[in-house]
Amino acid sequence: MPDSGTNERVPDSGTNERVPDSGTNERVPDSGTSERVPGSGLGSAERVPGGRRVAGRARGPRRAWLRHWYAWAMVAPVLIVMAVLIGWPLARGVYLSLTDATEANVGRTIGVNVIPSRYEFVGLENYLDILGSGLFWAKLGWTVTWTVACVALHYGLGLGLAVLLHRKLRFRSVYRVLLILPWAIPAFVAAFIWRYLYNSDYGVINAMLEAAGIGAVGWLNDPFTARIAVIAVNVWLGVPFMMVAMLGGLQSIPKELYEAAEVDGASPWQRFTNITLPSLRAVSSTVILLGTIWTFNMFPVIFLVTGGGPGSETEILVTYAFREAFTGVRNYSGSATWGVIILLLLVLMAFGYRRALRKTGEVW
Amino acid sequence: MKKQHKRGERGPLASIALHVTLIVASLISIFPVVWLILTSLKPRDGWLSTELELFNSPSLGNYGRVLSETAFPTWLLNSVLVAGLTMLLGVFLAATTGYAISRFRFPGYRGVMWLLLITQMFPVAILIVPLYNLMASLKLLNQLPGLVIAYMTVAVPFCAWMMKSYFDTIPQEIDQAGMVDGLSPFGAFWRVVLPLARPGLAVTAFYCFMTAWGEVAYATVFMSQEEKRTLGVGLQQFVGQHWSDWGLLTAAAALIAIPAAAVFLLVQRHLVTGLTAGATKL
């Protein structure tokens, strides 16, 4: 990490010394602007060609403290909350995943009787059990399918609608509001609505199919249709977010690019692939990553629409781990293990994604 | 069929195709909500109809039953309290952090950024058991504060992340000018930047509220007593495995969805601006 501290742009006394003539016209053009490269994100501190200034600076803990104490103080509340509320439970979760704790053997207090814990440290046994079971791979397969299908549809439909809405057309704001509506509905409410629509006896979807002479489908009773059903619900819920994000991205593309391309005789499709898509890359890479994480962990849709059923066919990793922890004999260690595995998968994915973006020259 | 940014006129056929596509998309988008409301207006057993009918002697009977015969009002109050508290605490705790990571490059900056990003990925399953045990030992199960504390694990990093992107949109020069005039970094934040960031704060608060409002997993586990439930948990009762009353459920759902959607659509312009600004700068 090439000292990220060097590029900090707070006008402390040091800056004044270095720019003695800044006087009246502030010091805006000096440090601030060079670092605030638009669109630069996490990596900005390093990418900036400004490190040279530091060369002669005294450094050391005391110096660092004087320069950065307010930044640290400002970050402190979040770090403290996260350490207590996330760090401790996480450490405990990781520890539980290395034991054989279940509801039956954890310590608890019933009335005045204190029952001590009887679970033991079992090392990586839980992990080996889970990774060696076909169940995990089957669930992982479905979770990946679910995530890829949902995110691809979110992105494709969202981008398509955004492109349509970006054109000059009548009733644009009406369409916009109507299309954003699903985003405004809380996910759990949406899940209930759709469950009713899918109801095999009284659901409107089957009523329509009957009316069209196709015949009713037991949507949530068959693994295959149930999977399609939950994907449809999640797509319905998620498209507006993508659409709005893409619309914002489209609006930030300078019109001149299109004009120039048109003068050069580029077809609409060429303009789309050579101007629109590359210009949207920064937004796209972000929302796709976020969308993937959200979908991977999408709890309410699965939990409330199908309850993971039929059987546990539509259960994704997260809902499965939840069920493991809180139904029947509560398997605390097993569910913690699932949690750790899920988290590792996501972190690996995020790192891999970021690497892939970097390789293609994307800044993130 | 990508008709991209054709400047000038488009043919009538293209126009029709465009509008038809958008109309179909809009219908799909609003249909479930419309159907929800229509169903909720049907009489008590109206949902038990296999006929395709829009109206069937509309009445507010289901709404009356939800409000008077079920614990819905209590759940609603619980949800509002939990989501409101989560929102206030989340924004309050995260505001300075959002500012710091937007403005300063300090040792540990990248660590904080990664930490915030990774906590967004936490599957509910990894924290829920330890948190459950923690709450149990602190006697906070079935207590609203317990649920709020659990929601902090999601809300705080999320708010910090969101607010960073809003602060990013406020020109650096403004707080620098404030500091030239003698304000400390805290002063510049409190007196100059925060007032300017009010729309951003509002949007972050709104997201935070909505997230807590719609949360199901923690609430299901932590709130087992009838009168402590939040909406996401309580509604599950209306359509249990042995007994279901979609009349009650649809009325309750409409009562939740309509105000939420109204507020959402009112503020959506701001949501959109802030969100995309955030997204491009993540």
Image (tube, coloured by chain):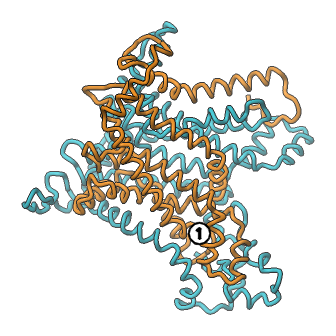
Where residue B165 sits, quadrant-wise, is bottom right
Question: Outermost residue, left direction?
Answer: A113
Q: Is residue B216 above or below residue A53?
A: above
User: Tag 1's secondary structure?
Assistant: helix
Q: Residue B101: percent from the left, percent from the top?
A: 58, 69
Q: Is residue B196 above or below residue B70?
A: below
Q: Residue A34: percent from the left, percent from the top?
A: 75, 72
- Chain drawn orange, letter? B
| Residue drawn at point x = 51 percent, y = 72 percent | A75
Q: Badge 1, how many Cα within 10 Å: few under 14, some, many 20+? A: many
Q: Is residue A142 above or below residue A114?
A: above
Q: Chain of mark 1?
A: B
Q: Which residue is mark 1?
A: B99
| Residue drawn at point x = 31 percent, y = 40 percent | A135
Q: Along the line of sight, which residue is nearer the eye, A268 or A307?
A: A307
| Residue drawn at point x = 52 percent, y = 51 percent | B207
Question: Outermost residue, top direction?
Answer: A213
In what quadrant of the picture does the C terminus of chain A appear? bottom right
Q: Residue A54: percent from the left, percent from the top?
A: 68, 85
In what quadrant of the picture does the N terminus of chain A appear? bottom right
Q: Amino acid at mark 1?
A: Tyr
Q: Along the line of sight, which residue is nearer the eye, A23 or A4?
A: A23
| Residue drawn at point x = 73 percent, y = 74 percent | A32
Where residue A59 sits, quadrant-wise, is bottom right
Residue A137 seen in render: no
Q: Residue A313: percent from the left, percent from the top?
A: 35, 32
Where residue A13 sits, quadrant-wise, is bottom right
Q: Along the line of sight, which residue is nearer the eye, B112 or A13?
A: A13
Residue B22 seen in render: yes
What's the colour of chain A in the image? cyan
Count of numbered circles in the view: 1
